[in-house]
Amino acid sequence: MDVNVTLATWSNLLIYSAMAVYAIAFLLYSSDLFAGRTLASSGKKATARRAGAKTSAKASAPVRTTRNSSVAVLDREDDAETADAGAAEAETGGPEEKATGASGTAGRRTAARMATALTVLATGLHVAAVLTRALSVTRVPWGNMMEYALTASALAVLVYIVVLYFADIRYLGTFVAGGALVTLGLCITVFYTPAAQLVPALQSYWIWIHVPIAILSTALLSVSAILAVFQILKARTEQKDTVTGLGRMFSRVPASEAVEQLSYRIAAVGFVTWTFTLIAGAIWAEVAWGRPWGWDAKEIWTFVVWVVYAAYLHARATRGWSATQVAVLNIVGFSSLIFNFAIVNVYFDGLHSYSGL
């Protein structure tokens, strides 16, 4: 079957276009994240204003004495309480931001809104690049390392957008947009493989089952690992009495406990899908090579990834492990996943040598 060179060229152009939009989104997300430094400083000033407002309101309140009693009545106690509440709301960013767990009012997050809109646009271009790549060869778009990375990164950003619908995780945008930008850069340079038909070993209906679930797992575990990084950094800032440097920058991030909960839930789903990936791979190996397991390098490292994430889930359910230690296990699991993809595929010989490089 011939390759449609025109569509393959369009796919490459769409990759470059998505990279350009991701780059702008990355800069805007970074601007929003670093703007938290200013908001944290404003919060400290709001605390001082709150104390001052409460004191001045009480001090300036007129005293009224009843005819038959010498009991003084403060007419402006309510005013003092109102000033106290107003200053507190100014410090926390108002009821809307309390609900979402982010700092700063919605009006102050113009950069984040623009970055999110651009991320959606970039994702559209990204998905279009995947589709045109598939149409150019009339097959699934995950036949080599380039196509796997291209599809997995698109799905990772889609996971971010879906989660964003339910929770304000725009503080992850810098890492998500930046990660997508780097991955696309690798796809078009280091991992680049000209559009071509599948090698005979991959011409099986199992490629429609085994690989897409692996891609979904990669996307889910990527987002979970990014959350784990933010959890660790946020926990470090929460341990300090004074808010400086890193703490101000991470004022956008909710409490580390909330970040950990979200990271765990996504990783739990990713573990289930990775388990299915492992099982489906064994079944495909039985069909293709007459045995479900042969201690091939790819098989071993796929199992290693599974073991690390199983240890992560077990550690989280076990007493004696701190939240930071559990998050480190999450990151180790993701690192083993990247090693399995970027190193094992390229430098280890075996039956799974389908990198295309």
Image: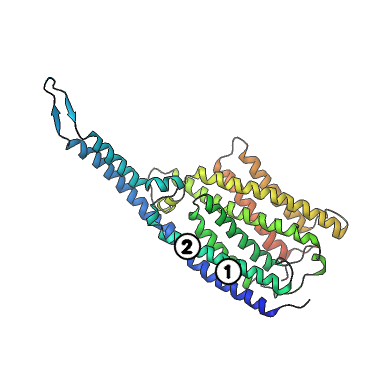
* Tag 1 residue: 125
What's the amino acid at mark 1? Leu
* Tag 2 residue: 115
Mark 1 nearby-residue class (10 Å; few <14, some 14–19, many ≥20): many
Tell me if 300 is positioned left or right of 112 in this view: right
Residue 19 appears in which quarter of the rendering? bottom right
- Using the image as rendered, state which of residue 149 and residue 123 is in the foreground: 123
Q: Residue furthest right?
A: 290
Relative vertical location of residue 355 with respect to residue 316 in this rendering, above or below: below
Relative vertical location of residue 142 with respect to residue 239 in this rendering, above or below: below
What's the amino acid at mark 2? Ala
Circle 1 SS class: helix
Q: In the image, what residue occupies the spot 73% across and 77% down?
A: 3
- Residue 165 visible to the viewer: yes
Residue 38 appears in which quarter of the rendering? bottom left
Residue 88 appears in which quarter of the rendering? top left
